[in-house]
Amino acid sequence: MRPATQNLFTIAISVTLVCSAAVSVEAWPGLKKSQPAAKKTFQEAVDSSKEEHPTAELLQTDRSANLTYALPKGWQATKNPFYAHDLLVKKSTEEKGSLIIADRESKGSLEKTAKALEDELSKQCDSFKLESNEMTKLASGVNCARIIHTGKVDDIEIRQVNYVMPYLKGKVLLVTGTVKKTDLAGMTVFEEFASSIEVRKKGLL
């Protein structure tokens, strides 16, 4: 892993690629007992899920104070004094996962930023395999770029999704979710999480 720098995007990618310190073999009890996932595409899993409106108790204010989000059921959020945004981890002892929020300077379009991110991920993630890099509209109505890829961390096969979303002027919001490759339900959670984000301070890209 590359040394951490003050660039929040670099920090986010570095933390994500070790699954927020939650994807080592020791941190995946029950790994051998995991069952093969149903043969559904990511979009099919999203489309078949039932949307639930978050209760007030699940609404969280990010450490940056610039945005709010709905905390997924079965996940916990932590606030690190050395990191600008909340860090979320899945509480399950068998199906670990992480959700990382970061902001990144961007002078181009969402598509251009997503392409640059794809290139970086292909160099940093072992056994990188791109599944999709496309523009999409979230349930919230927000247009964003979504990158989905698979790879390996400590010999564990993972699937990761990155949402590149409009944020403050001159910046994009990067939401990165990582789970075990077979955890399609976790991928659906990421889509719902990204859709729940509301930026308090509006700004143009």
Image (spheres, helix red, strand yellow):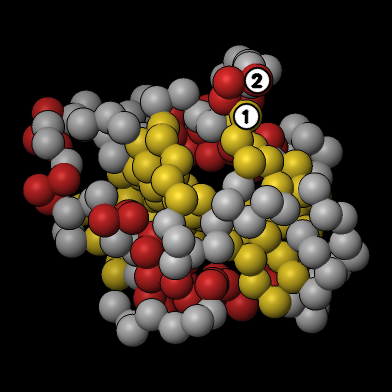
| Residue 63 appears in the rendering | yes
Does 5 appear above or below 103? below
Label 1 neighbour load within 10 Å: few <14, some 14-19, many 20+: some
Q: Where is the C terminus found, in terms of image quarters? A: bottom right
Marker disc for residue 59: 1
Could you tell me how many numbered marks the image carries? 2
Depth check, front residue: 108 or 75: 75
Residue 52 is situated, as x and y percent measured from the top left of the image, at 63, 16
Q: Residue at x 38, y 70 (%)?
A: 14
CB contact under 8 Å: marks 2 and 1: yes
| Mark 2, secondary structure of its residue | helix
Q: Is residue 165 left or right of residue 98?
A: right
Instruction: Note whether residue 42 is visible.
Output: no
User: In the rendering, at what x and y percent does residue 22 appear?
Assistant: 25, 50
Given the image, on which type of amino acid does mark 2 rest?
A: Ala
In this image, 15 relative to 164: left or right? left
- Residue lying farthest to the front in this orientation: 81
- Residue at image position (58%, 52%) is 63
Residue matched to label 2 = 56
Quadrant of the rendering where the N terminus is positioned: bottom left
